[in-house]
Each structure stands twice: as C-alpha cells, then as structure tokens.
Image: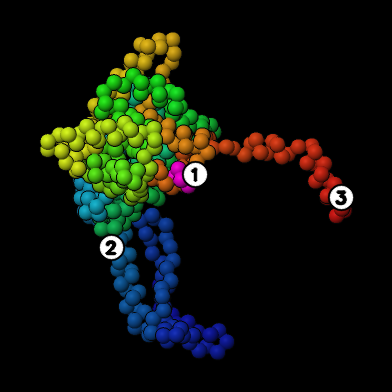
C-alpha cells in the first residue's frame, strides 16, 4: 500500500503525461473470489489526490468484501427481472419462453435460495440436476443446446442483479456453461423432415373444406411461419401486383392468455410473389369472404374475426393424416409439424429447383447464413466435386508441372 510518483530512473525527474499527472498508488485487495490481487491506479496531478483516491478505493474494497446484505430469493429476483425485460419491450413470446424455462428448470432447484448465498457449488449441482432431467413420453435427456440456453437465462438473471448492486459476483457466468464430456460421442441432429410436391398433392387432395385447403396450400407454397400466417389480414393480399405483404406475426404465448400482434421474427418484413399454384385458390377464398355484409379488409385472412387457433390447426392437420392412413394402410405416413409441413417443405422445394440461396432467404425472411445452416444437407455438397477432381490423371498432371521447378 503506497503512493508513488513516476520518475525517470536516470535523472530522477517526474515523468508526467500530457495533463501533467505523475502520481499513482499501488495496493493489494481481496475480491469475493478470495484470490488476493494487486491494483495499480491511474495517474493523478498531486500526491494528495492520489492518497484520497487510494483511501476511497480501499474503503470500497472493504465494503465489497463483506458483500451485499440484501435478502431476496432467486424467485423474487426473477419477478423483478421480468418487469425489467418488459420495460425493454422484448417480445411477449420471448418473455413467455423465459418464464416457462425458469419455472420448469431453474426455480425447482434454486428458486428459494437467497441470491447472495448462491455459490459455485450450487451451480455445479444444478448442472448435475439438469443432466439427469428427462422429458417426453420416451424420457429423453435434454440436449446440450437446450441446457446451454437455460444456463444463459440464469446467467442473465444474475447479471441483472449484479448491474443493480444486489450481488457483486455472477457465479453462473464464472462457473461457465454446460460442456460436452470428452468421451461423449456427438450424434448428428435428426435429418430435417419435409414433404415432396407429390406428398403434398396427395395430402391436399383429401382436404375438402375450402378454408383448410387454402390454409395448407398457403403454408406449403409460401413457407411462412405459422404466426405470420395467423396475423395476415385481407389488406396484406395484393392481387394487382401479385404480392403478399408479411410485416407482422401473431403470438399467443402470453401470460394470462390472449394474443398480441408484433413485428416479424428478426424484424425482416418482406413482400413475396403469389405463385401460380396458389393464386386461383387464394382468389376464390378472398372473393368468397368479401361477400359478407360486414366484411373488413382488416379481418384475419384465416379466420376473419378470429384467427385460426393452434389447437384447431393441429386437430385438422392430424385429421387428414388419419384419412391418409386409412386410405393407404400399407404405407408409413410421416406426420409433419406445421413448421415442417410449410417452411421446411417450401425451402426444400426452392433448393431442389436451384433457386439462389439469396432469393430463398429473402422469401423466407431469414439470413443467408441461417438458410445455409438449417438446410445445409439439401444443398449440393463438395464431396462429388472433390472425388471428380482428385483423380490419378490430375495428380499425374500436377506432378509433371512440379518437375519443372525441381
């Protein structure tokens, strides 16, 4: 613990910066981690200022070493964190996802603990708890990707507490996220599931009711997200210019129920062309509904005064899969989720037809990087090119060229 002046070793004269400062202090302190560290201050104009700065620094270290005295559980902190997230205008669907993940995976193990008492051992034991947890009828363990997501949520909650002075150390961050075991074999993710045009045609031929024929056709021929389709209104359809405007999404993952219309995922608004395979059917649907006496352009395209609910969509989709099963009892009919039925299938269709990846990304409202990562195995690989290039003949030609330089 000392206040010193920076001096030239040969002349003994003070070495001053551009502002004339040459005094500083050097001391030791012990943070919450328990490891004693040395601290060197910035420079000051005179000795008195350096001494005062040293006094304040040591006083703050003394307070910090005792830790905050606030009494608040992690559950109570999460309630505050939720309010903070809402004030930042995060999407309700994101807040709802955090709420579900916290209550299902963090609160049961750490929720009742005082946040100032949560330590590295608690985080380590929570990791073990998550490693043993299973889900679904098959009781599968949670994936590494999912567990890292939950850890990030916990770290964000504690980082919020740290930012407002409730705690001095984010133990979740210091502990580190979940990691693969060195001897664990990383299994490739399940193959991306989609349907071919033939499989779609066979499915849609069984759909009799106009509104559902339009819904499933729209889903397949446009590749929109379900929430984007639920949020569409009649004013988003422009037959004159043959375009569909997609600038919003509907979320019903809201605490307390109800729904909310927000901007699209990633805020990527777009106008997509109405394909010839869809246009006649879509036109029939729009014209049919315009016959209603109280028709409004602001009605939902799918549902009019009330959007198609998730439950109803799934029930109808499964109903027609049951019809197919009865009609083709000797075939294995793959039941697709709404996302697989539309978005994955449409993307695979565009890729197989050789549409440039930039145009696919624009139509789906994603980045090129996301499209390439999600549908990588559908794009032509380099393997065939490598096999056709690394041949004995080409190696012989390379050797002949190399000899010239020997």
Q: Are marks 1 and 3 in contact (CB under 8 Å)?
A: no
Answer above or below: position of 27 versus 78. below
Q: Which residues are magenta?
A: 357-361
Q: Which residue is mark 2?
A: 63
Residue appearing at x 25%, y 35% in the figure: 286
Determine crowd level at label 2: few under 14, some 14-19, many 20+ residues with C-alpha closer than 10 A.
few
Give the x, y percent position of residue 320.
32, 19
Give the x, y percent position of residue 315.
27, 23
Pick the residue in front: 353 or 195.
353
SS at circle 1: helix
SS at circle 2: helix
Q: Which residue is mark 1?
A: 357
First in sequence, mark 2 or 1: give its number.
Answer: 2
Q: Is 355 displayed left or right of 206 in the figure?
A: right
Q: Is 307 displayed left or right of 376 in the figure?
A: left
Answer above or below: position of 53 versus 288. below
From mark 1 to mark 3, how far is it between C-alphas?
A: 42 Å
Camera-near label (3 vs 2) is 3
Q: Which residue is mark 3?
A: 403
Camera-near label (1 vs 3) is 1
Q: How is the image coloured?
A: rainbow
Q: Quadrant of residue 396?
A: top right
- Residue 339, disc: none
């Amino acid at each position: 613990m000392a206040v010193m002046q920076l001096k030239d070793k040969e002349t003994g004269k003070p070495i001053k910066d551009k502002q004339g400062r040459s005094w500083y202090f050097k001391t030791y302190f012990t943070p919450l981690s328990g490891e004693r560290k040395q601290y060197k201050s910035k420079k000051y104009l005179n000795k008195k200022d350096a001494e005062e700065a040293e006094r304040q620094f040591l006083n703050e270290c003394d307070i910090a070493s005792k830790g905050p005295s606030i009494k608040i559980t992690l559950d109570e902190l999460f309630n505050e964190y939720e309010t903070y997230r809402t004030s930042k205008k995060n999407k309700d669907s994101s807040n709802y996802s955090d709420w579900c993940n916290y209550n299902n995976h963090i609160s049961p193990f750490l929720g009742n603990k005082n946040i100032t008492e949560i330590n590295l051992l608690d985080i380590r034991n929570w990791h073990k708890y998550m490693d043993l947890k299973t889900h679904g009828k098959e009781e599968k363990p949670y994936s590494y990707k999912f567990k890292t997501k939950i850890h990030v949520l916990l770290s964000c909650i504690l980082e919020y507490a740290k930012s407002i002075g409730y705690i001095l150390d984010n133990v979740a961050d210091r502990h580190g996220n979940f990691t693969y075991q060195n001897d664990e074999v990383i299994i490739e993710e399940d193959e991306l599931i989609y349907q071919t045009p033939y499989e779609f045609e066979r499915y849609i031929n069984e759909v009799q009711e106009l509104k559902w024929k339009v819904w499933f056709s729209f889903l397949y021929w446009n590749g929109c997200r379900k929430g984007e389709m639920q949020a569409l209104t009649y004013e988003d359809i422009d037959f004159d210019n043959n375009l569909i405007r997609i600038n919003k999404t509907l979320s019903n993952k809201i605490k307390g129920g109800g729904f909310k219309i927000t901007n699209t995922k990633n805020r990527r608004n777009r106008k997509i062309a109405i394909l010839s395979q869809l246009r006649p059917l879509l036109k029939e649907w729009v014209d049919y509904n315009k016959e209603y006496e109280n028709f409004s352009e602001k009605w939902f395209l799918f549902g009019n005064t009330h959007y198609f609910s998730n439950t109803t969509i799934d029930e109808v989709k499964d109903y027609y899969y049951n019809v197919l099963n009865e009609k083709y009892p000797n075939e294995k009919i793959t039941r697709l989720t709404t996302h697989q039925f539309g978005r994955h299938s449409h993307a695979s269709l565009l890729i197989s037809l050789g549409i440039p990846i930039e145009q696919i990304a624009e139509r789906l409202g994603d980045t090129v990087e996301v499209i390439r990562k999600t549908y990588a195995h559908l794009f032509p690989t380099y393997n065939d090119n490598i096999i056709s290039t690394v041949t004995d003949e080409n190696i012989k030609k390379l050797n002949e060229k190399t000899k010239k330089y020997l």
